Amino acid sequence: MTGPILIFDSGVGGLSVAHALRYAYPAAAFCYACDNAWLPYGVRQDTELTARIVAVCLAAVRACQPSVLVVACNTASTLALEQLRAALTIPVVGTVPAIKPAAHLSTSRHIALLATSATLRRPYTQTLIDSFASDCCITRVAADGLVVEAERWLGGYPPSQMRLNAILTPLWQAARDTPPMDTVVLGCTHFPLMLPWLEALSPVALNWVDSGAAIARRVGQVSETFNLGHHDNRSFTTATAESLCAGLADYGFAPPELLHLKN
Ligand code: DGL
């Protein structure tokens, strides 16, 4: 099957993954779909969220006939990958916290996982930690507020240093622990969009690890048939979002069309 690479997230976070994918596949065609009507996912109940993710992804797949679906959302992937794969015939690539590369990088063996509160409590996340970082101390930092800040930023409003520090204080404390935390897993795709601020506010130099490059590698393994000829780069939202037009355009996407969900 040929078709574009469809990238899905609750909001603008998937644009950090779009960036990594465009870098890896500059000639490929992309579509972007986000469920901005239900944002943020990190504070939603699991059962209603699973059904919603499947409904939105099916609608987006109907709209753009992709060759592969990239679920560019840790909160969705750690919950609904199985259900999505059962509902679709195209390959589905998920995004999960980059615990394994972080464990390779950390010399102090103290890692922080910065993610939504939902991703932090998922059994999938615990299994990643047990499998790849069982010898590491893990500081879990719930940063649902950082999702909101990233949405505001892509809508044209820079974050305030005070609000960011209020969210990130547990990270800065972990960096002063014994042993000191030296590596942060950006376990939400919204967070790489905020990296310049994170680096500027951090009291010490840290390794910041995201999943972008690993997702790009995985996409290349599951599908070599991206549509290379037709670059309409459509985008889709579940609620009208004038404020997203500029942010989507910065990442090469056309103004959003409204997605129609089947009841
Ligand atoms: N970007 C999403 C993630 O990677 C979640 C943001 C949200 O809470 O909606 O987890």
Image (cartoon, grey):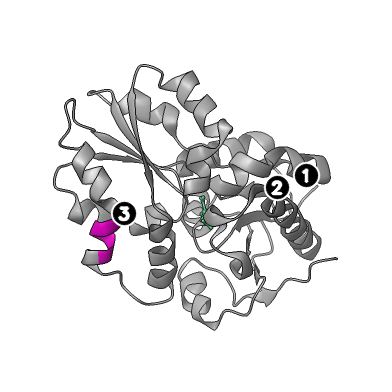
Residue kind at label 3, given as amino acid type? Leu
Q: Secondary structure at mark 2?
A: strand
Q: Is residue 141 left or right of residue 27?
A: left
Between 260 and 221, the residue placed more toward the observer is: 260
Of the image marks 2 and 1, the number of the one nearer the N terminus: 2
Q: Which residues are magenta?
A: 163-167
Instruction: Locate the C terminus and report the quarter of the image it occupies.
Output: bottom right
Q: Is residue 44 visible?
A: yes
Residue kind at label 1, given as amino acid type? Ile
Tell me where residue 206 appears, x and y as whole percent.
22, 40
Of the image marks 3 and 1, the number of the one nearer the N terminus: 1
State the residue lying farthest toward the front: 45
Q: Is mark 2 within 8 Å of ligand 1?
A: no
Rendered image: mark on residue 68: 2
Between 14 and 3, the residue placed more toward the observer is: 14
Foreground tag (2 vs 3):
3
Quarter where residue 166 is shown: bottom left
CA distance separating discs 2 and 1? 6 Å
- Tell me the crowding category of disc 2: few under 14, some 14 to 19, or many 20 or more residues within 10 angstroms, Cα based: many
